[in-house]
Image: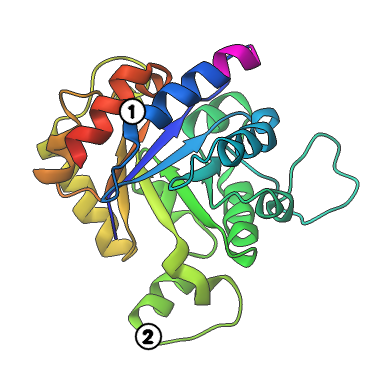
Amino acid sequence: MKPLIVANWKCNPITFKEVKFLFNSIKKGVRGIKNVEVVICPPFIYLPILRAFAFAKGYGGFAFGSQDCFWEERGAFTGEVSPLMLKNLGVKYVIIGHSERRKYLKETDEMISKKIQAVLRANLKPILCISDISEIKNLKFKAEFRNSEMGRKKKIGTSSRIKNLIVAYEPLFAIGTGKPCSPERAKKMRLTIKKKLNVPVLYGGSVNSQNAKDYVEKASFQGLLVGGASLKAKEFIKIVRNIS
């Protein structure tokens, strides 16, 4: 697969004027780059507007992602957004289990497992964020994932869609601190993850244009999950160009 560069805008920006400026700047900066897949993950409210804006302006060639979703398809769940709603918007990726949601929204491994299952059922690609290998061990479906990958057992449902799962390693000490994990240390975790789940692994945590290339080339990650730097158009464009 092509390197995957995911922009997680989190709870930013505040106004649509800022959103359009950021989005337009990134699109112009990465236009013509074909050997990297760029994914923009804005807050929910901007997804339909940005998608319409992108196609109206002729800005194809990249993907949209969501920062979260609910585990049910529909129903009386006030404030939630389902995977099918996201799919209908043309969303391709869904970030699941980010450490900020674990910390501030008290998301549990059980909740994250149900979300992964729902996203896979919808034929979308979940990006499972972990800060420690135990967060994989605690997943309810880890055995199905592992056995399906090894070909020892084939189940109908989520396990048959394991090829769509992506893991993002984000060490807690590196998220939003400006103190990234060393490529050498990150590589050890990538290898550990690959032993548990044979799926693509991204790195996230204080990624910038200076260290981005090392995570892909030296540590062999298959892409990056970019937080704060994705809100700075010039910096994010540099990251994409450095990887390409």
Location of residue 234 (image quadrant): top left
Q: Is mark 2 on a helix, strand or loop?
A: loop
Pointer 2: what residue? 151
Give the quadrant of the C terminus.
top left
The answer to whether residue 48 is left or right of residue 64 is: right
Region rendered in magenta: 15-19
Residue 201, relative to residue 50: is it above or below?
below
Q: Which amino acid does label 1 sit on?
A: Gly
Earlier sequence position, callout 1 versus callout 2: 1
Task: Give the main secondary structure, helix, strand or loop, of the magenta stretch.
Answer: helix
Residue 223, relative to residue 193: is it above or below?
above
Viewer-nearest residue: 140 or 30: 30
Looking at the rendered structure, the number of numbered marks drawn on it comes to 2
The answer to whether residue 2 shows anywhere in this view is yes
Categorize mark 2 by other alpha carbons within 10 Å: few (<14), some (14-19), many (20+).
few
Q: Which amino acid does label 2 sit on?
A: Gly
Residue drawn at (37%, 19%), measured in percent from left and top?
233
Give the quadrant of the N terminus.
bottom left
How far apart, in angstroms, are the residues tagged by discs 1 and 2? 42 Å
Categorize mark 1 by other alpha carbons within 10 Å: few (<14), some (14-19), many (20+).
some
Location of residue 210 (image quadrant): top left
Q: Which mark is residue 86?
A: none
Residue 199: x and y in percent read 34, 62
Residue 193: x and y in percent read 29, 55
